[in-house]
């Protein structure tokens, strides 16, 4: 039996875990007889891999906490047929070094590696020295490079199996009318997300458009083991303002990761800015209405209907070039006045996704049409899977 290690040790936000599972799924479906294993940062929500029972092994690499990192490869097989590395961090470090060498960096900016980066790079160096790879080693970035003999099925789709206990928990939120989950912010700087006053307007507009709708405010206000699985840049007061704006808004924050997945599974729609947590909806079959803006455009769909409310911004997407000020003002794309101008498109997108007749193919055609007419950098927009 062919053994494959998807060596996806990178930063720990939830979206990167789903990305790793997606790669693993594509290897598994290309060769269903293979054993696919996944290595992840210990700080990531690796528990989600339990939703894919075909994953043969999950290895937690302690690179995020200097107090627990022992600078050794965790207990895992030392011999593999294939290893495929996520070497994005190494590429980012090399690119940064080139910028420094050319003097092409902002004045006063002295880039340095934190503990997580140093430990991650050291981990990859150790795997190259200590793991025996019998048939070949590949990489995922900057483009997919696979050794001879390793198959890959790019059209494979994920389907996280939500635990029965979590589904039982989610039944307490039953509602006969439309159910819309709201994720107001992610784990990044608050500057890249709509402010509470904007969310109050957005929810009010949705309330006025769809009869008997109920909203479920999701996310996490607590910093626990998964430090990137929070909306920590959003204060408790920010959440309270949104909750106080209507008795049809239910507080579903901090109910646990699998319970939130189960809740998303029961909802008809998720509305949120770009966030790795939002990809979870697409993995349980729930359409995602994205308030787009900032660095990254949506590129993950998993064959589920989606709709991106694109900004009026000739520089979008910035592809990482927008440097957010953690303590600064909200970025232009997410300012209340600009979001108010996008409300008609947001409402049309919601109606489109709430229509049970809408298919993924419909969503893909609509997305391409929206890109064609939007004042954005079209050449920077990622291609969505057919």
Image (cartoon, rainbow, N blue to C red):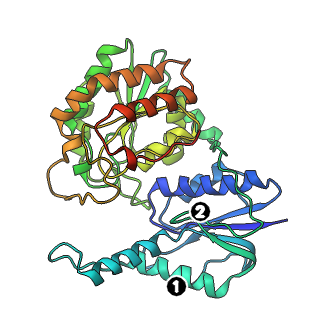
- Which image quarter: residue 247? top left
Identify which residue, 132 or 13, lies in the foreground.
132
Q: Residue at x 59, y 35 (%)?
A: 167
How dense is the environment of label 2, judged by Cα within 10 Å: few (below 14), some, or many (20 and up)? Answer: few
Q: Is residue 146 left or right of residue 347?
A: right
- Name the residue: 57% across, 34% down: 285
* Tag in front: 1 or 2: 2
Residue 260 placed where, x, y %? 48, 41
| Residue 160 spot, x, y in % from top left | 62, 44
Query: Which residue occupies the foreground of this view, 242 or 142?
Result: 142
Compared to residue 166, the image places residue 245 above or below, namely above
Which of these two is toward me, 106 or 262?
106
* CA distance separating discs 1 and 2: 28 Å
Which secondary structure, mark 1? loop
Residue 136: x, y in percent? 72, 75
Quickly name the residue at label 1: 71
Where disc 2 sits, the SS reads loop
Give me the disc on residue 144: 2
Q: Determine the residue located farthest toward the top in the rendered image.
A: 211
- Vertical side of 136 occupied by 317: above or below: above
Q: How far across and how far down the image is residue 13, in percent?
A: 44, 58
Q: Residue at 14% x, 50% y: name it.
A: 329
In the picture, measured across the screen, residue 33 lies left or right of residue 371, that is right
Q: Against 121, is 256 above or below?
A: above
User: Which is more N-terminal, label 2 or label 1?
Assistant: 1
């Amino acid at each position: 039996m062919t053994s494959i290690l998807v060596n996806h040790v990178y930063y720990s936000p939830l979206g990167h875990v789903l990305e790793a599972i997606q790669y693993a799924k594509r290897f598994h479906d290309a060769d269903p007889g293979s054993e696919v294993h996944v290595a992840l940062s210990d700080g990531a929500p690796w528990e989600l891999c339990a939703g894919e029972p075909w994953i043969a092994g999950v290895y937690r690499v302690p690179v995020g906490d200097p107090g627990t990192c022992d600078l050794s490869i965790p207990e895992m097989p030392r011999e593999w047929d294939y290893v495929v590395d996520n070497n994005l961090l190494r590429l980012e470090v090399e690119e940064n070094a080139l910028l420094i060498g050319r003097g092409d960096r902002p004045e006063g900016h002295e880039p340095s590696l934190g503990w997580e980066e140093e430990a991650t790079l050291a981990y990859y160096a150790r795997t190259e020295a200590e793991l025996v790879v019998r048939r070949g080693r590949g990489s995922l970035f900057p483009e997919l490079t696979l050794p001879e003999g390793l198959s890959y099925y790019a059209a494979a789709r994920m389907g996280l199996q939500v635990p029965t206990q979590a589904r039982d928990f989610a039944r307490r939120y039953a509602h006969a009318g439309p159910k819309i989950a709201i994720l107001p912010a992610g784990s990044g700087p608050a500057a890249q997300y709509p402010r509470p006053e904007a969310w109050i307007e957005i929810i009010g507009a949705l309330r006025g458009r769809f009869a008997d709708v109920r909203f479920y405010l999701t996310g996490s206000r607590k910093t626990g083991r998964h430090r990137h699985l929070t909306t920590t840049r959003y204060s408790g007061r920010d959440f309270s303002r949104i909750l106080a704006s209507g008795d049809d808004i239910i507080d579903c924050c901090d109910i646990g990761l699998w319970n939130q997945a189960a809740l998303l599974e029961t909802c008809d729609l998720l509305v949120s800015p770009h966030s790795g947590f939002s990809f979870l909806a697409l993995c349980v079959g729930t359409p995602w209405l994205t308030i787009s803006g900032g660095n990254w455009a949506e590129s993950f769909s998993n064959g589920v209907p989606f709709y991106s409310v694109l900004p009026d911004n000739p520089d979008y997407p910035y592809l990482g070039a927008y440097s957010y000020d953690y303590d600064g003002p909200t970025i232009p794309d997410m300012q209340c006045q600009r979001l108010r101008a996008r409300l008609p498109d947001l409402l049309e997108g919601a109606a489109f996704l709430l229509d049970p007749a809408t298919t993924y193919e419909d969503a893909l055609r609509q997305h391409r049409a929206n890109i064609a007419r939007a004042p954005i950098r079209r050449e920077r927009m990622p291609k969505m899977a057919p």
